[in-house]
Image (tube, helix red, strand yellow):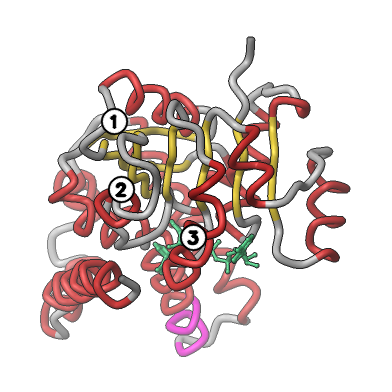
Amino acid sequence: MTCKVAVLGAGKMGEALLGGLVRSGRPAPALGVTCRRKARAAEIEARHGVAPMGNAEAAAWADVLVLAVKPQDMGALLAEIAPAIAPGTLLISVAAGLTTAFFEERVPAGVAVVRAMPNTAVLVDEGMTVLSGGSHASQQQVEQAAELFRGVGHTLTVPESQQDAATALSGSGPAYFYFLVEAMTDAGVLLGLPRDKAHELAVRSSVGASVMLRDCGTHPVELRAAVTSPAGTTISAVRELERHGVRAALMAALEAARDRSGELATSYA
Ligand SMILES: NC(=O)C1=CN([C@@H]2O[C@H](COP(=O)(O)OP(=O)(O)OC[C@H]3O[C@@H](n4cnc5c(N)ncnc54)[C@H](O)[C@@H]3O)[C@@H](O)[C@H]2O)C=CC1
Ligand SMILES: O=C(O)[C@@H]1CCC=N1
């Protein structure tokens, strides 16, 4: 029998994952979803054909619970569902920062917890999800969780000690690329290009570069060298990027994201 999966909290990430589960061929009767607001529940049902249910009902019904509320709402959600969780249930959290221990302390003893950090590219089946098993999760259960996320992209399993770093790099990662495209578009406008054309050029450059990174098997240093002609235009731009500390800025930015991820579990404990 198909295992029953319920997504608790249908915001941006919860809806993206639910949509992915539907697209990857899971039958609607084996899927559940919960929403805080009625209007949102109606919207989710109309868009994905999955009937919303209550949190405790979902916790008792599903074999796998995907917890997709914000870190600050997780404590209240766990208090609501803990009495309904059966011993064999697999809990998967996608919340930034919250450790598997955070969940293990709040659910019945021995329940398996997997911490997962996807990114919004799950919306286009190009997600990157980084997974770690808690102290009661078997390798098979981590694999079961990974299998769900492989329906919407790629997965990597890491020790939990690396999750905050992975969150900073690939969980938040899409935002840095959008930021770059936005900044490049402004730069194009500064140089006199109409905004719509500047936007198109920035987007097409980023998509072209991403596909080459993914498909050519060539190191980014080599790919950049191939664009950078001696005494040409690119090296003049690269010198300015280095002069303005863009590389160091990225390192500092990811360090800040990593540190914030580390703070979240203690902030909401
Ligand atoms: N947005 C992103 O790119 C990523 C988000 N995440 C994680 O996913 C989680 C959700 O983030 P978003 O989707 O961005 O936030 P969001 O605010 O869009 O979604 C959270 C949803 O949970 C609902 N909710 C809150 N308490 C609830 C309850 N007791 N019962 C049912 N529903 C409840 C809210 O109404 C809201 O719809 C967070 O923990 C975040 O760290 C993880 C990876 C990437
Ligand atoms: O900004 C956040 O906290 C969430 C987690 C990773 C991406 N978005």
The N terminus: image quadrant: top right
* 186 within the magenta span: yes
Secondary structure category for the residue under label 2: helix
Distance in Å between CA atoms under marks 3 and 2: 12 Å
Please say whether residue 121 is visible from this viewpoint: no
The amino acid type found where label 3 is placed reads Ala
Residue 168 position in % (x across, y down): 27, 62
Distance in Å between CA atoms under marks 1 and 3: 21 Å
Query: Which corner quadrant of the image does residue 195 belong to?
Result: bottom right
Report which residue position mark 1 lands on: 137
Relative to 197, is 249 on the left or the right?
left
Question: Quick check: marks 1 and 3 in contact, CB under 8 Å?
Answer: no
- The stretch in magenta equals 185-190
Distance in Å between CA atoms under marks 2 and 1: 11 Å
Report which residue position mark 2 lands on: 104
Question: Which of the two labelled residues, at mark 3 and mark 2, occupies the earlier sequence position?
Answer: 3
